[in-house]
Image: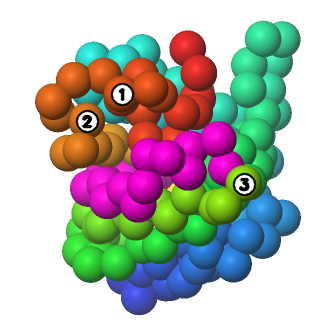
Amino acid sequence: MTRDDYVDLVERRYFGNVVLADIPAVVACFTDDASVTIYHGDAASRLFKAQPGAGETPLPRFFEHLLANYEPGFTEFVHYVDVANERCAAMFLVTLTPKPDSAYRDAGVQRLRNCNFFRCRDGLIHEMTIYYSNPGAAGGADAHGSRPTGFPQA
């Protein structure tokens, strides 16, 4: 794969399909044994797996929750690609607009700064690590425990 292929995988295929709310197309961007880990401040990290074991959260669950509650947007991408090692990272702005019937509608539109790290294999995402900041929660815990989407719950 080339640098452009990685940018296409991350920005158009993965994030583009999240925006389109096409969960099967989002999941198709991952290997069959993929994992996603989310880190946010001092909160416990959360793990999602394409092949979850007992007590583990299935990968699609995160997207189902996100898309049931928000209209997401992703802009201002800056990509760092290591073609030789099948890795890339992306910094970007996330805009989460609550849906009218969302339990999070009162939180209003949120803007997050994310940095995601991708380890790829055979043109698909094998491991994704998500780090995000929620500047609006800097003043203290909100009703959702300073997690902008309220998910994953600890």
Q: Looking at the picture, how far across and down is residue 90, in whole percent?
A: 31, 64
Q: Quadrant of residue 9?
A: bottom right
Say which residue appears at 54% left-offset and 83% top-offset. Answer: 12
The residue lying toward the viewer, choosing from 1 and 45, is: 45
Which residue, given by chain and number where applicable, does mark 1 sit on?
142
Q: Which residues are magenta?
A: 102-119
Q: Residues within 10 Å of mark 2 (few under 14, many from 20)?
A: some
Q: How many marks?
A: 3
Horizontally, is 5 left or right of 14 in the view? Answer: left
Of mark 2 and mark 1, the one earlier in the sequence is 2
Which residue, given by chain and number where applicable, does mark 2 sit on?
137
Per the model, the C-alpha gap separating discs 3 and 1 is 19 Å
Which quadrant does the C terminus fall into? top right
Camera-near label (2 vs 3) is 3
Inspect the magenta stretch and tell me whether residue 20 lies in it.
Answer: no
Horizontally, is 108 left or right of 103 in the view? Answer: left
Examine the rendered structure and indicate whether residue 94 appears above or below residue 151. Answer: below
Q: Residues within 10 Å of mark 3 (few under 14, many from 20)?
A: few
Q: Residues within 10 Å of mark 1 (few under 14, many from 20)?
A: some
Q: Are marks 2 and 1 in contact (CB under 8 Å)?
A: yes
> Can you see residue 144?
yes
Say which residue appears at 71% left-offset and 65% top-offset. Answer: 26
The residue lying toward the viewer, choosing from 82 and 104, is: 104
Which residue, given by chain and number where applicable, does mark 3 sit on?
101
Query: The residue under label 2 is which amino acid type?
Result: Ala
Of mark 2 and mark 3, the one earlier in the sequence is 3
Horizontally, is 78 left or right of 1 in the view? Answer: left
Say which residue appears at 29% left-offset and 67% top-offset. Answer: 92
Q: Looking at the picture, how far across and down is residue 134, in whole percent?
A: 27, 43
Secondary structure, mark 3, is loop
> Can you see residue 14?
no
